[in-house]
Amino acid sequence: MVQHQRYNQLKNGGDEEAATLVFVWTNRGYYRRRRPKILSFLLLSLLSCGFILAPHFFSFSSALSHLYFFGVKNDGLSGDLDVNAPLCSSISNGSVCCDRSHFRSDICFMKGDIRTHSPTSSVFLYSSKNSDDNVSSTVDGDELQHEKIKPYTRKWETSIMATIDELNLISKRRNSDVDHSCDVIHDVPAVIFSTGGYTGNVYHEFNDGIIPLYITSQQFNTEVVFVILEYHDWRVMKYADILPHLSSYPPIDFNGDNRTHCFTEAITGLRIHDELTVDPILMKNNESIVDFRNLLDRAYRPRITGLIRKAQEKTSGCALATPKRMHNQPKKPKLVILSRKGSRAITNQNILVKAAEEIGFEVHVLRPEPTTELAKIYMELNSSDAMIGVHGAAMTHFLFMRPRCSVFIQVIPLGTDWAAETYYGEPARKLGLKYIGYKISRRESSLVDEYDKDDPVLTDPSSLNQKGWEYTKKIYLERQTVKLDLTRFRKRLLRAYDYITRIHLQSQHLA
């Protein structure tokens, strides 16, 4: 109750970021209680670890009822509700139904004669029925119902939602004088959403966009058209490998395409379950984050095959080839270090590399840039056995690692414990990775050189975080670097090495 009061105080006071942290922390028990128990098949798990870039397959059932499979998950503060209550699951033809019960996003459903009208930021639904008591918002004239929605998955953040285009969903009588005749007729449903908001940040692009798009569209088995508000060519190109596995049709730029597109069914908004995850309980075929990861594998495989072939062509002719490994020489586990520059960089990274090599790792240092092709990052991490990185958006790339046989070590700077666990630690476990969190000591932080040893910045980071996101960002995210205590950190490296070698030995015995 105290936490709920604190949430309301922060929310009413305008500190949305702090309110968000209090909300998720307060409801952490709910998410854990609802965590599904999924059977793990050891034999298949171990075999999958014995192959690099091993293909994954899973099947999709035909969508018998597209609307039914949007269950309700209680993201509010009022206690547990029935997670499978099918709001808007049985709307009649010519109806608009909006589910606004979720903390993270709104989602609206339309069924019938649906027509887009981008000049007025509207989607019209023409109906032969008259207004009645079941219509939530009746206005004068031919409008039967008028709903407004911002189709973005950070509903609680009013600051960022203020930048998202609003869409009008309007039900009108079919005999209206203006009916916007169809220019393009589609025989598959539409999913309408925005790619505005946080752009250029890989965490937000996956957590707020790609994964919710998977959750919302998976039931259609690619027989769906994406209609995008605030369309960005660069973003569509960045995820060009993934999108064809979600939709068999080219996306529509809602704002840039003034033609009237006609559908018989449309979903506006995206469903989101939790941080970087897919909840099988809420999915039609019980798909999980592992299934999403399998989709990534299928999406990137053709491009990776091309990259490997190109690399082989470069080493042909007189180029010095890499010496072949002796038949009885064991393969070293591959460790990828996601390197940073500036804030939260590991200042003694070269010593870290040497320490890992001494233990027995083959070390690769990877520094992703905003322009780095995702397929190249996927290729590097999918072929790795372990990844090390300091807390930050780049940790989202744990999604590219192989479940059940890979180790993810997250270095956790001062003041980032909660965020590191919530955004990356717990999601990594749900994917099936061996997760190791390494909380640095005060002496490993550069902040020890800026503040007195008794300063709350060093002794009580939570008190600074409670002051608001700007404090956390300014002090712990933007002004802190890490100098690892290699004697202490070596224990984590050894744990990772022992786990990987044990998995490899087990997979060899089963092969």
Image (cartoon, grey):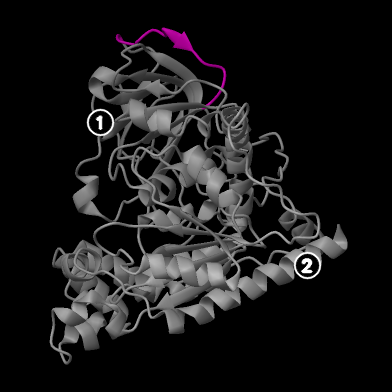
**Which residue is disc 1 drawn over?**
139
144 shown above or below 414? above
Along the viewing direction, whichever of 322 and 491 lies nearer the viewer = 322
For marks 1 and 2 on the same chain, the one whose residue lies earlier in the sequence: 1
User: On residue 266, which mark appears?
Assistant: none
Instruction: State which mark lies toward you, 1 or 2.
Output: 2
Along the viewing direction, whichever of 14 and 431 lies nearer the viewer = 431
Q: x and y percent of residue 481 in the render? A: 26, 69
**Which residue is disc 2 drawn over?**
505
Quadrant holding the C terminus: bottom right
**Residue at left 50%, top 40%?**
376
The residue carrying pointer 2 sits among few (fewer than 14), some (14 to 19) or many (20 or more) residues within 10 Å by Cα, namely few
- Which segment did they paint magenta? 177-189
- Residue 70 visible in this rendered orientation of the protein: no
Q: x and y percent of residue 15 in the render? A: 17, 65
Q: x and y percent of residue 38 in the render? A: 70, 64
- Residue 138 visible in this rendered orientation of the protein: yes
Callout 1: SS = loop
Amino acid type assigned to the residue bearing label 2 in the image:
Leu
409 shown above or below 262? below
Callout 2: SS = helix
Decide if residue 119 is on the left or right side of residue 124: left
Q: x and y percent of residue 507 in the render? A: 79, 62
Determine the image quadrant of residue 193.
Answer: top left
